[in-house]
Image (spheres, rainbow, N blue to C red):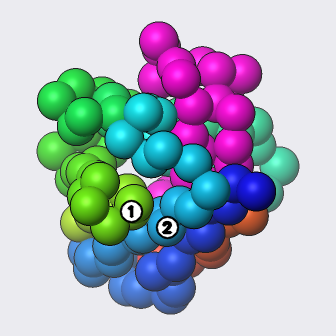
Amino acid sequence: QVQLVESGGGLVQAGGSLRLSCSASGLTFSSFAVGWFRQAPGKEREFVAGISGGGSRTEHADSVKGRFTISRDNTKNTGYLQMNSLKPEDTAVYYCAAGAVIRFRTVSGYNYWGQGTQVTVSS
C-alpha cells in the first residue's frame, strides 16, 4: 500500500522559512516524479514545484521561483520543499504527490497523494 506523508508545516511570520518533507512508502520511490501542490481556501489546487525520479530535472512555479527549492533523497524515500522568504499569500495546505509524470504541472499525472500539511504565514 502506497503512502505519502507530509510533515513540516506550521505557523511562521512573513520572511521566515519552513522545510516540508514528504515521506514515501510502498513504492519504488526513485521511479516516480514528485510534485508539490498547494490549495488555499476557496481556490483551486495549484502547482508549486516538481522533480524527476532521479532528481536531475526540476521545475518551480513562477510565484515561488527563487524562494522555494524542491529536492529529494532517494536513499531515504523522501522529498523536500525548502521554503524561504515566505509571504502571507503562501498560506495554504501543501500536498505532495508521486507519479510517472511527463509534465510536472499536470495534476492528473500523479498517481498518489498525501493528506496535506497546513502552512500559515502571518504578516
Residue 108: within the magenta?
A: yes
Circle 2 — which element?
strand
Picture coordinates of residue 115 (x, y %)? 74, 64
Instruction: State the image quarter where residue 110 is shown.
Output: top right
Q: Nearer the viewer, residue 113 or 122?
A: 113
What residue is rendered at 50% in x and 87% in y?
11
Q: Which residue corresponds to mark 2?
A: 23
Residue 122, above or below 33: below
* Residue 60, visible in the rendered structure: no
Relative placement, left or right, of 1 versus 27 is: right
**Under tag 1, what secondary structure?**
strand
- The residues tagged by marks 1 and 2 sit, at their Cα atoms, a distance apart of 5 Å
- Residue 22 shows in the view: yes
Camera-nearest residue between 74 and 64? 74
In this picture, which residue range is highlighted in magenta? Answer: 87-113
| Residues marked 1 and 2 touching at CB (< 8 Å) | yes
> Vertically, is 86 above or below 99?
below
Disc with the residue nearer the chain's start (1 vs 2): 2
Q: Give the class, few, some or many, for how many residues have Cα within 10 Å of label 1's Cα (few <14, many ≥20).
A: many
Answer few, some or many: residues within 10 Å of disc 2's Cα (few below 14, many 20 plus, some between 14 and 19).
some
Give x and y (percent) for residue 73: 25, 58
- State whether residue 28 is above or below residue 107: below
Please tell me which residue is depicted at 42% across the width and 69% down the height of the picture: 21
Q: Which mark is residue 78?
A: 1
State whether residue 109 is above or below residue 69. above
